[in-house]
């Protein structure tokens, strides 16, 4: 979460995975791999059949009739008054084909976009503003503002709709395209055209180097507070270290804050769930009605039995929903806040030619009680909404409710 701009709601798997075995770290399988011009959620690439075969991945033998594509190219080449960028034409054709699938989470990233995604998941994105972006109701939207970043200093807020970036309309943008436009060299500026509660406003923000760990923690009046902003390759280790410090301090309860967390690696969600659950079902993956994988927690649940409240909101997505759902279904935690985003699908990341990536939806995931959260989300046990006035006055009523429940 976090870098400066990340994609919304990613529960991702690497290109190769064996049943019952942890996936190869995604960015290793890429050759290096939730804005961050804009962190979240978040949240495109080309296919290489030879690599798919080498990695023992499914690869269709079907081919498309590309006569119309070739005919169009020949006519462009013969008639266009200017130079044609063949790489741009190829990338555009592939991007258009993938977008035509009609799934928001099946996307193509060129090499530059793929590298940015790798940086997002590592928590260092170079020049950015410290905000996470996602898509809500087909509009690019800020989903989380990171503390101490240019976005916070410029009074950007979660829920702000981003209609333009440097004067360019974001209509039809993917999260990756928004991230690409928001990011830039440290010290340069980006101008955002926003809508907040129906009011239009413009913000010009100077980009800074953004680098933030995915996990932070503190102990307040005997209660451990763990905040997870994304699920990256270090999240499990950092979260367990925080949990062990809580245990050593003898905290009376724990608050797990996953508000605004857009997701990340599926195995990181498994690792975090294992802090509270010992050898319990975490998530089931299905393609159609066929179960293709199940993930269980490990046997070293350091906070097993410790009273826990999980904070979630409408921007808690994917991997964060998996953790919240697992802890809730196994009665290991009480949920407080607002209904979660509702992303119940899993994507696989496939390396293509020249470092491009295809992110493709391969399955739906289900909580231990058999719920798929797509477009539904998880409704908390205690619904507490933050008003605009609460946000302006830094009055965190959701955190206050969590503390109240743990002190009862």
Image: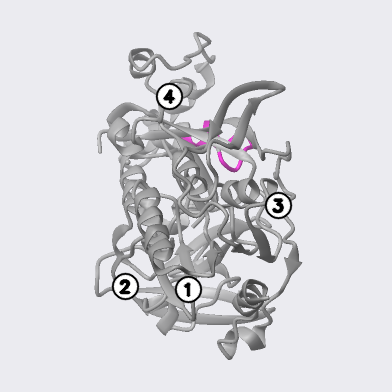
**Going from the N terminus, do you reach mark 3 or mark 2 first?**
2
- Is 136 magenta? The answer is no
According to the image, label 2 marks what residue?
207
Q: Nearer the viewer, residue 106 or 72?
A: 106
**Going from the N terminus, do you reach mark 1 or mark 4 first?**
4
Tell me the SS state at disc 3.
Answer: loop
Q: Nearer the viewer, residue 264 or 302?
A: 302
Q: Give the quadrant of the N terminus.
A: bottom left
According to the image, label 3 marks what residue?
377
Q: Give the quadrant of the C terminus.
A: bottom right
Instruction: Report x, y in % for residue 148.
Output: 37, 79
Cβ–Cβ under 8 Å for marks 4 and 3: no
Display coloring: one colour
According to the image, label 1 marks what residue?
192
According to the image, label 4 marks what residue?
17
Residue 396 vs 281, above or below: the answer is below
Q: Distance between the residues labelled 4 and 3?
A: 27 Å
- Range of the magenta residues? 95-105
Please give the name of the residue rendered at 66% of the width and 57% of the height, measured from the top-left corner. Answer: 340
Cβ–Cβ under 8 Å for marks 1 and 2: no
């Amino acid at each position: 979460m976090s870098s400066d701009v990340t994609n919304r709601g990613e529960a991702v798997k690497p290109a190769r995975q064996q049943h019952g075995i942890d996936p190869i770290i995604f960015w290793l399988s890429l050759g290096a791999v939730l804005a961050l011009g804009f962190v979240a959620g978040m949240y495109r690439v080309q296919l290489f059949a030879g690599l798919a075969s080498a990695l023992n991945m499914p690869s269709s033998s079907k081919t498309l009739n590309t006569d119309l594509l070739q005919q169009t190219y020949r006519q462009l080449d013969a008639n266009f008054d200017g130079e044609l960028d063949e790489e741009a034409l190829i990338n555009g054709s592939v991007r258009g084909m993938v977008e035509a699938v009609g799934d928001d989470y099946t996307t193509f990233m060129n090499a530059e976009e793929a590298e940015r995604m790798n940086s997002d998941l590592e928590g260092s994105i170079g020049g950015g503003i410290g905000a996470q972006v996602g898509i809500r109701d087909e509009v690019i939207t800020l989903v989380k503002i990171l503390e101490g970043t240019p976005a916070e200093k410029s009074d950007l807020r979660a829920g702000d709709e981003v209609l333009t970036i440097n004067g360019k309309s974001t209509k039809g943008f993917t999260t990756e395209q928004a991230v690409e436009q928001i990011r830039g060299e440290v010290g340069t500026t980006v101008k955002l055209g926003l809508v907040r509660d129906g009011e239009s406003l413009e913000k010009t923000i100077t980009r800074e180097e953004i680098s933030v760990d995915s996990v932070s923690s503190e102990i307040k009046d005997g209660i451990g507070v763990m905040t997870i902003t994304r699920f990256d390759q270090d999240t499990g280790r950092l979260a367990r270290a925080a949990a062990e410090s809580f245990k050593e301090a003898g905290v009376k309860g724990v608050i797990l804050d996953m508000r605004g967390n857009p997701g990340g690696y599926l195995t990181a969600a498994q690792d975090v769930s294992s802090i509270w659950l010992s050898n319990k079902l975490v998530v089931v993956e299905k393609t159609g009605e066929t179960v293709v994988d199940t993930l269980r927690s490990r046997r070293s649940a350091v906070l097993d039995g410790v009273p826990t409240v999980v904070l979630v909101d409408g921007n808690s997505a994917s991997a964060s929903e998996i953790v919240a759902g697992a802890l809730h279904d196994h009665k290991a935690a009480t949920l407080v806040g607002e209904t979660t985003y509702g992303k119940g699908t899993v994507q696989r990341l496939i390396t293509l030619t020249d470092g491009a990536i295809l992110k493709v939806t391969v399955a739906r995931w289900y909580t231990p009680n058999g719920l798929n959260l797509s477009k539904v989300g998880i409704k908390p046990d205690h619904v507490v909404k933050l008003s605009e006035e609460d946000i302006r006055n830094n009055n965190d009523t959701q955190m206050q409710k969590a503390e109240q429940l743990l002190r009862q």
